Image (spheres, rainbow, N blue to C red):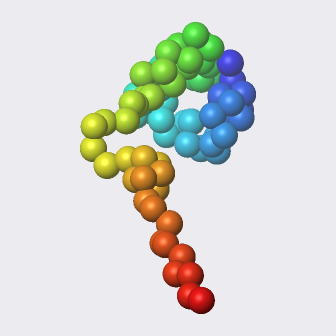
Amino acid sequence: MTVKEVAEMLAVKEKTIYQWAESGQIPRIKLNGVLRFDPDDIQACIASCKSTPSGGYNAVAQTASVRSPRKVVRN
């Protein structure tokens, strides 16, 4: 894959891909000074960046347990 294709796939700027490749944050292949990327390596890199929620605060669960205020009925 080219820098442009990876940038489109990850929805980032091409400059970001160059920076990530230079710093070793994403796997790359350099052929005669041109960067290329293996699609399988990029998918594995994406998968390794995924995180699962920890046992801490969960905003979704908190809002689900919030009760609505009681209505006061007056006659």
Tell me the quadrant of the picture where the C terminus can be found.
bottom right
Q: Which one is nearer the viewer's eye here, 51 or 60?
A: 60
| Labels in figure, total | 0
Residue under the point 63% across and 42% down: 12
- Mark yes or no: residue 48 visible: yes
Q: Residue furthest left?
A: 56
36 to 67, vertically: above or below: above
30 to 4, vertically: above or below: above
Is 67 on the left-hand or right-hand side of 74?
A: left
> In x, y percent, where is residue 21?
49, 30
Q: Which one is nearer the viewer's eye here, 19 or 34?
A: 19
Question: Toward which corner of the image does residue 2 lie, by quadrant?
Answer: top right
Q: Which one is nearer the viewer's eye here, 14 or 64?
A: 64
Tell me the quadrant of the picture where the N terminus can be found.
top right
- Mark yes or no: residue 29 visible: no
Question: Toward which corner of the image does residue 32 lie, by quadrant?
Answer: top right
> In x, y percent, where is residue 4?
71, 32
> In x, y percent, where is residue 66?
43, 59
Q: Residue furthest bottom?
A: 75
Residue under the point 71% across and 35% down: 8
> In x, y percent, where is residue 15?
59, 44
Residue under the point 38% across and 47% down: 58
Is 33 on the left-hand or right-hand side of 25?
A: right
42 to 13, vertically: above or below: above
